[in-house]
Amino acid sequence: MTNETVLLERDDDGTAWVTLNRPEVHNAFDENVIHRLREVFQILAEDNHCRVVVVKGAGKSFSAGGDVNWMKRAAAFSHNENLADAEYLAAMLNSLYNLNKMTIACVRGFAMGGGLGLLSCCDMVIADENATFALSEVKIGLMPATISPYVLAAMGERNARRYFQTGERFKGQRAYELGLVHELVTTEEEMDAQLNIILDHVRDNGPFAMREAKRLIMDYADQPISAKMMQDSAERIAAIRARPEAKEGLTAFLEKRKPNWIGEDNT
Protein backbone atom coordinates (compact mmCIF):
# COMPACT_ATOMS: atom_id res chain seq x y z
CA MET A 1 0.00 0.00 0.00
CA THR A 2 1.22 3.51 -0.77
CA ASN A 3 2.58 5.63 2.10
CA GLU A 4 0.71 8.71 0.90
CA THR A 5 -1.72 9.99 3.51
CA VAL A 6 -4.10 11.36 0.86
CA LEU A 7 -4.59 9.81 -2.57
CA LEU A 8 -5.68 11.72 -5.68
CA GLU A 9 -6.99 9.93 -8.76
CA ARG A 10 -8.52 11.59 -11.80
CA ASP A 11 -10.74 9.93 -14.42
CA ASP A 12 -10.99 10.94 -18.05
CA ASP A 13 -14.65 11.95 -17.53
CA GLY A 14 -13.70 14.77 -15.14
CA THR A 15 -14.26 12.93 -11.86
CA ALA A 16 -11.56 13.29 -9.18
CA TRP A 17 -11.29 10.91 -6.24
CA VAL A 18 -9.71 12.18 -3.01
CA THR A 19 -9.12 9.38 -0.51
CA LEU A 20 -7.97 9.82 3.07
CA ASN A 21 -5.44 7.01 3.36
CA ARG A 22 -4.72 6.27 7.00
CA PRO A 23 -7.11 3.35 7.58
CA GLU A 24 -5.10 2.06 10.54
CA VAL A 25 -6.23 5.13 12.55
CA HIS A 26 -9.66 5.56 10.90
CA ASN A 27 -8.18 8.31 8.66
CA ALA A 28 -7.52 10.67 11.54
CA PHE A 29 -6.02 14.06 10.66
CA ASP A 30 -2.49 15.14 11.43
CA GLU A 31 -0.46 18.00 10.02
CA ASN A 32 0.67 15.90 7.05
CA VAL A 33 -2.91 14.99 6.09
CA ILE A 34 -4.01 18.62 6.37
CA HIS A 35 -1.12 19.89 4.23
CA ARG A 36 -1.72 17.21 1.61
CA LEU A 37 -5.48 17.87 1.49
CA ARG A 38 -4.90 21.58 0.95
CA GLU A 39 -2.40 20.82 -1.78
CA VAL A 40 -4.85 18.44 -3.48
CA PHE A 41 -7.73 20.92 -3.35
CA GLN A 42 -5.50 23.63 -4.84
CA ILE A 43 -4.50 21.26 -7.66
CA LEU A 44 -8.14 20.46 -8.40
CA ALA A 45 -9.20 24.11 -8.29
CA GLU A 46 -6.84 24.76 -11.22
CA ASP A 47 -7.91 21.65 -13.17
CA ASN A 48 -10.40 22.85 -15.77
CA HIS A 49 -11.14 19.30 -16.90
CA CYS A 50 -12.31 18.28 -13.42
CA ARG A 51 -16.02 18.83 -12.77
CA VAL A 52 -16.75 16.78 -9.62
CA VAL A 53 -14.68 15.73 -6.61
CA VAL A 54 -15.53 12.68 -4.49
CA VAL A 55 -14.04 12.63 -0.98
CA LYS A 56 -13.90 9.32 0.88
CA GLY A 57 -11.89 7.35 3.41
CA ALA A 58 -9.85 4.18 2.92
CA GLY A 59 -10.83 1.24 5.07
CA LYS A 60 -13.74 1.27 7.48
CA SER A 61 -14.15 4.99 8.23
CA PHE A 62 -14.42 8.42 6.64
CA SER A 63 -12.39 10.19 9.33
CA ALA A 64 -12.31 9.95 13.11
CA GLY A 65 -11.09 13.55 13.44
CA GLY A 66 -7.83 14.69 14.98
CA ASP A 67 -4.99 12.20 15.39
CA VAL A 68 -4.17 11.64 19.07
CA ASN A 69 -0.41 11.92 18.55
CA TRP A 70 -0.85 15.15 16.58
CA MET A 71 -2.94 16.61 19.41
CA LYS A 72 -0.30 15.54 21.93
CA ARG A 73 2.33 17.40 19.93
CA ALA A 74 0.07 20.44 19.66
CA ALA A 75 -0.36 20.51 23.44
CA ALA A 76 3.34 21.36 23.70
CA PHE A 77 3.23 24.08 21.02
CA SER A 78 3.61 27.76 21.80
CA HIS A 79 0.60 30.00 21.18
CA ASN A 80 2.03 31.13 17.84
CA GLU A 81 2.73 27.55 16.77
CA ASN A 82 -0.80 26.51 17.71
CA LEU A 83 -2.21 29.51 15.86
CA ALA A 84 -0.25 28.68 12.69
CA ASP A 85 -1.36 25.04 12.92
CA ALA A 86 -5.02 26.02 13.33
CA GLU A 87 -4.84 28.60 10.54
CA TYR A 88 -3.59 25.98 8.13
CA LEU A 89 -6.46 23.66 9.05
CA ALA A 90 -8.91 26.54 8.58
CA ALA A 91 -7.41 27.31 5.16
CA MET A 92 -7.67 23.65 4.10
CA LEU A 93 -11.35 23.47 5.07
CA ASN A 94 -12.07 26.73 3.27
CA SER A 95 -10.32 25.51 0.12
CA LEU A 96 -12.71 22.54 0.05
CA TYR A 97 -15.79 24.62 0.90
CA ASN A 98 -15.05 27.10 -1.89
CA LEU A 99 -13.72 24.58 -4.41
CA ASN A 100 -15.01 25.50 -7.88
CA LYS A 101 -16.31 21.97 -8.55
CA MET A 102 -19.18 19.94 -7.16
CA THR A 103 -17.95 18.05 -4.09
CA ILE A 104 -19.44 14.82 -2.74
CA ALA A 105 -18.51 13.06 0.50
CA CYS A 106 -19.08 9.30 0.81
CA VAL A 107 -19.22 8.48 4.50
CA ARG A 108 -18.87 5.15 6.28
CA GLY A 109 -17.74 4.28 9.79
CA PHE A 110 -16.64 7.24 11.89
CA ALA A 111 -17.12 10.89 10.88
CA MET A 112 -16.16 12.74 14.03
CA GLY A 113 -14.68 16.13 14.89
CA GLY A 114 -12.65 17.30 11.92
CA GLY A 115 -14.10 14.46 9.84
CA LEU A 116 -17.58 15.88 10.38
CA GLY A 117 -16.18 19.29 9.51
CA LEU A 118 -14.74 17.94 6.28
CA LEU A 119 -18.05 16.49 5.11
CA SER A 120 -19.83 19.72 6.09
CA CYS A 121 -17.62 21.52 3.56
CA CYS A 122 -18.89 19.30 0.74
CA ASP A 123 -21.86 20.14 -1.47
CA MET A 124 -23.44 16.72 -1.01
CA VAL A 125 -23.07 13.83 1.45
CA ILE A 126 -23.98 10.18 0.91
CA ALA A 127 -23.72 8.20 4.14
CA ASP A 128 -24.22 4.72 5.50
CA GLU A 129 -27.08 4.68 7.99
CA ASN A 130 -24.74 2.96 10.47
CA ALA A 131 -22.04 5.64 10.22
CA THR A 132 -21.21 7.33 13.54
CA PHE A 133 -21.09 11.12 13.78
CA ALA A 134 -20.00 13.38 16.64
CA LEU A 135 -18.63 16.80 17.47
CA SER A 136 -16.56 15.23 20.20
CA GLU A 137 -14.02 18.00 20.86
CA VAL A 138 -15.57 18.96 24.21
CA LYS A 139 -14.95 15.42 25.48
CA ILE A 140 -11.23 16.25 25.63
CA GLY A 141 -11.53 19.87 26.69
CA LEU A 142 -11.47 21.42 23.22
CA MET A 143 -14.08 22.98 20.93
CA PRO A 144 -14.96 22.58 17.22
CA ALA A 145 -13.62 26.02 16.37
CA THR A 146 -12.16 25.84 12.84
CA ILE A 147 -14.92 23.55 11.56
CA SER A 148 -17.73 25.53 13.17
CA PRO A 149 -18.61 27.88 10.23
CA TYR A 150 -19.19 24.90 7.95
CA VAL A 151 -20.98 22.71 10.48
CA LEU A 152 -23.24 25.62 11.44
CA ALA A 153 -24.13 26.14 7.80
CA ALA A 154 -24.91 22.44 7.43
CA MET A 155 -26.92 21.72 10.60
CA GLY A 156 -28.11 25.16 11.70
CA GLU A 157 -27.60 27.11 14.90
CA ARG A 158 -30.32 25.41 16.96
CA ASN A 159 -28.93 21.92 16.39
CA ALA A 160 -25.35 23.11 16.82
CA ARG A 161 -26.23 24.48 20.26
CA ARG A 162 -26.91 20.91 21.34
CA TYR A 163 -24.22 18.90 19.60
CA PHE A 164 -21.35 21.36 20.03
CA GLN A 165 -21.85 21.18 23.80
CA THR A 166 -22.89 17.55 24.41
CA GLY A 167 -20.35 15.88 22.14
CA GLU A 168 -22.79 12.97 21.88
CA ARG A 169 -22.63 10.41 19.10
CA PHE A 170 -25.42 9.90 16.61
CA LYS A 171 -26.07 7.70 13.59
CA GLY A 172 -26.87 8.26 9.93
CA GLN A 173 -30.62 8.74 10.30
CA ARG A 174 -30.11 11.54 12.81
CA ALA A 175 -27.43 13.11 10.60
CA TYR A 176 -29.96 13.02 7.75
CA GLU A 177 -32.59 14.72 9.91
CA LEU A 178 -30.07 17.41 10.89
CA GLY A 179 -29.26 18.19 7.26
CA LEU A 180 -25.69 16.89 7.40
CA VAL A 181 -26.51 14.05 5.02
CA HIS A 182 -28.44 14.17 1.73
CA GLU A 183 -28.76 10.46 0.94
CA LEU A 184 -28.76 7.46 3.29
CA VAL A 185 -27.72 3.98 2.17
CA THR A 186 -27.45 0.60 3.88
CA THR A 187 -24.66 -1.14 1.97
CA GLU A 188 -21.45 -0.26 0.14
CA GLU A 189 -23.07 -1.41 -3.11
CA GLU A 190 -25.99 0.93 -2.53
CA MET A 191 -23.58 3.79 -1.84
CA ASP A 192 -21.75 3.14 -5.11
CA ALA A 193 -25.07 3.00 -6.98
CA GLN A 194 -26.29 6.27 -5.45
CA LEU A 195 -22.97 7.96 -6.21
CA ASN A 196 -23.12 6.79 -9.82
CA ILE A 197 -26.62 8.25 -10.20
CA ILE A 198 -25.30 11.65 -9.12
CA LEU A 199 -22.19 11.36 -11.29
CA ASP A 200 -24.37 10.54 -14.29
CA HIS A 201 -26.31 13.76 -13.69
CA VAL A 202 -23.07 15.74 -13.42
CA ARG A 203 -21.67 14.30 -16.66
CA ASP A 204 -24.74 15.58 -18.51
CA ASN A 205 -24.22 19.16 -17.32
CA GLY A 206 -22.17 22.03 -18.69
CA PRO A 207 -18.96 22.18 -16.56
CA PHE A 208 -18.70 25.96 -16.65
CA ALA A 209 -22.42 26.30 -15.90
CA MET A 210 -21.98 24.12 -12.80
CA ARG A 211 -19.09 26.24 -11.56
CA GLU A 212 -21.06 29.43 -12.05
CA ALA A 213 -24.15 27.92 -10.39
CA LYS A 214 -22.04 27.14 -7.31
CA ARG A 215 -20.66 30.69 -7.36
CA LEU A 216 -24.24 32.00 -7.22
CA ILE A 217 -24.77 30.17 -3.96
CA MET A 218 -21.50 31.37 -2.47
CA ASP A 219 -22.17 34.97 -3.44
CA TYR A 220 -25.90 35.20 -2.68
CA ALA A 221 -26.48 32.94 0.34
CA ASP A 222 -27.73 34.83 3.41
CA GLN A 223 -27.71 38.13 1.50
CA PRO A 224 -30.83 40.29 1.28
CA ILE A 225 -32.45 40.54 -2.15
CA SER A 226 -31.53 43.99 -3.42
CA ALA A 227 -31.40 45.99 -6.62
CA LYS A 228 -27.67 45.33 -6.73
CA MET A 229 -28.19 41.57 -6.50
CA MET A 230 -30.91 41.64 -9.15
CA GLN A 231 -28.65 43.58 -11.50
CA ASP A 232 -25.74 41.25 -10.80
CA SER A 233 -27.85 38.15 -11.51
CA ALA A 234 -29.02 39.67 -14.80
CA GLU A 235 -25.41 40.42 -15.78
CA ARG A 236 -24.41 36.85 -15.01
CA ILE A 237 -27.10 35.20 -17.11
CA ALA A 238 -26.42 37.61 -19.99
CA ALA A 239 -22.72 36.73 -19.86
CA ILE A 240 -23.20 32.97 -19.70
CA ARG A 241 -25.74 32.97 -22.56
CA ALA A 242 -23.03 34.31 -24.84
CA ARG A 243 -20.59 31.50 -24.06
CA PRO A 244 -20.04 28.60 -26.50
CA GLU A 245 -21.09 26.11 -23.84
CA ALA A 246 -24.56 27.64 -23.45
CA LYS A 247 -25.02 27.99 -27.21
CA GLU A 248 -24.09 24.34 -27.71
CA GLY A 249 -26.41 23.28 -24.87
CA LEU A 250 -29.39 25.09 -26.35
CA THR A 251 -28.65 23.85 -29.87
CA ALA A 252 -28.33 20.27 -28.62
CA PHE A 253 -31.63 20.57 -26.77
CA LEU A 254 -33.44 21.88 -29.86
CA GLU A 255 -31.85 19.20 -32.04
CA LYS A 256 -32.73 16.52 -29.48
CA ARG A 257 -29.17 15.32 -29.06
CA LYS A 258 -26.61 15.28 -26.27
CA PRO A 259 -24.29 18.30 -26.00
CA ASN A 260 -20.71 17.78 -27.07
CA TRP A 261 -18.95 19.18 -24.04
CA ILE A 262 -18.33 15.87 -22.23
CA GLY A 263 -14.59 15.46 -22.00
CA GLU A 264 -13.81 19.04 -22.96
CA ASP A 265 -12.04 21.58 -20.76
CA ASN A 266 -14.52 24.46 -21.22
CA THR A 267 -12.23 27.10 -19.78
Image (cartoon, rainbow, N blue to C red):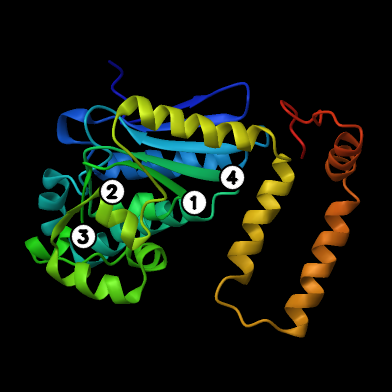
Q: Kindly state the secondary structure of the residue where label 1 is placed.
A: loop
Query: Which of disc 4 and disc 2 is earlier in sequence?
Result: 4
Which residue is at 78% across, 72% downward? 232
Q: CA distance from mark 1 to mark 2?
A: 15 Å
For the N terminus, the image quarter is top left
Vertical side of 243 occupied by 97: above or below: below
Asked whether disc 1 touches disc 3, contact meaning CB atoms under 8 Å apart, the reply is no
Is 82 positioned to the left or the right of 262 in the image?
left
Where is residue 155 drawn, in percent x and y?
35, 65
Is 75 positioned to the left or the right of 176 in the image?
left
Residue 230, located in which quarter of the rendered image? bottom right
Question: What is the three-letter code of the residue carrying label 4?
Answer: Lys
Q: Nearer the viewer, mark 1 or mark 2?
A: 1
Which residue is at 74% across, 40% downward? 206
Q: Which residue is mark 4?
A: 101
Q: Kindly state the secondary structure of the residue where label 3 is placed.
A: loop
Residue 19, located in which quarter of the rendered image? top left
Where is residue 174 drawn, in percent x and y?
25, 56
Q: Kindly state the secondary structure of the residue where label 2 is placed.
A: helix
Q: CA distance from mark 1 to mark 4?
A: 9 Å
Where is residue 110 drawn, in percent x and y?
20, 43
Q: Which residue is mark 2?
A: 115
Question: What is the three-letter code of the residue carrying label 2?
Answer: Gly
Vertical side of 14 occupied by 44: above or below: below
Question: What is the three-letter code of the residue carrying label 1?
Answer: Asp
Query: Which of disc 4 and disc 1 is earlier in sequence?
Result: 4
Q: Nearer the viewer, residue 93 or 179?
A: 179
For the question of whether residue 78 can be seen, the reply is yes
Query: Which of disc 3 and disc 2 is earlier in sequence?
Result: 2
Asked whether disc 1 touches disc 2, contact meaning CB atoms under 8 Å apart, the reply is no
Is 125 positioned to the left or the right of 164 in the image?
right
Q: Which residue is mark 1?
A: 123
